[in-house]
Amino acid sequence: METKWLDREQIDRDIPSVPFAELNFDQDIGVYCHQGEPFTGVCSQRYPDGKLQSIIHNVLGTSSGVTAAWYPNGQIMLYSEMHADELHGMYIEWAKDGTKTTEQRYRRGNLITE
C-alpha cells in the first residue's frame, strides 16, 4: 500500500472524483453508470462538513482499484484493493486512534493470508 492513501487531504486535492450520488446502478447490466454509461473513474462521498469520507476507483462500472475511507477526524479507516467488485489484494482496517485492526490479502475474493 502506498502511504499517500493515509492522507485524506492529499487524496482530496490530487485525485479528481465524481460524487457517488451522481452514479446510478443499472440493474439490467449490473454496474454503476454516470450520464448513461458504465462509469470509469473515481467516485467519492463526503461528510456533512464537506470533508472526504471515502473514494472508490471504478472501471466500467465495477469497483476496481483502491477503495479508501476515513473517519471524520481524518484518520484512515479502511484501505482495500478491488478488481471487478471483488477483493483482490490488500484489505486493511484501522481503529479511530490509528491502531491497525485488520490486515488481510485476497485473490479474486478469497482470503489468502491474514
Image (tube, rainbow, N blue to C red):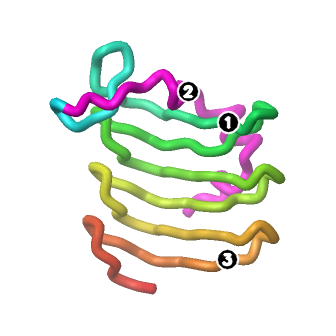
| 105 up-or-down from 67: above or below | below
Q: Nearer the viewer, mark 1 or mark 3?
A: 1
SS for dot 1: strand
Q: Report how far apart the C-alphas of labels 1 and 2 lie in the structure.
A: 8 Å
SS for dot 2: strand
Q: Report how far apart the C-alphas of labels 1 and 3 lie in the structure.
A: 23 Å
Q: Which residue is mark 1?
A: 46
Tag 1–tag 2 contact (CB < 8 Å) = yes
What is the residue that sits farthest to the left in this orientation?
Answer: 28
In this picture, residue 89 sits left or right of residue 26: right
Q: Which residues are magenta?
A: 1-27
Q: Pick whichever of labels 3 and 2 is earlier in the sequence.
A: 2
What is the residue that sits farthest to the bottom in this orientation?
Answer: 114
Q: Residue at x 72, y 38 (%)?
A: 47
SS for dot 3: strand
Q: Residue at x 55, y 63 (%)?
A: 1
Q: Report how far apart the C-alphas of labels 3 and 2 lie in the structure.
A: 28 Å
Q: In the image, what residue type sits under mark 2?
A: Pro
Q: Pick whichever of labels 1 and 3 is earlier in the sequence.
A: 1
Query: Percent x, y for residue 92?
Result: 55, 69
Q: In the image, what residue type sits under mark 3?
A: Lys
Look at the image and say whether residue 104 sits in the magenta stretch.
no
Q: Which residue is mark 2?
A: 19
Mark 1 residue crowding within 10 angstroms, few (<14) / some (14–19) / many (20+): some
Q: Which residue is mark 3?
A: 100
Q: In the image, what residue type sits under mark 1?
A: Arg
Q: Which mark is residue 99?
A: none
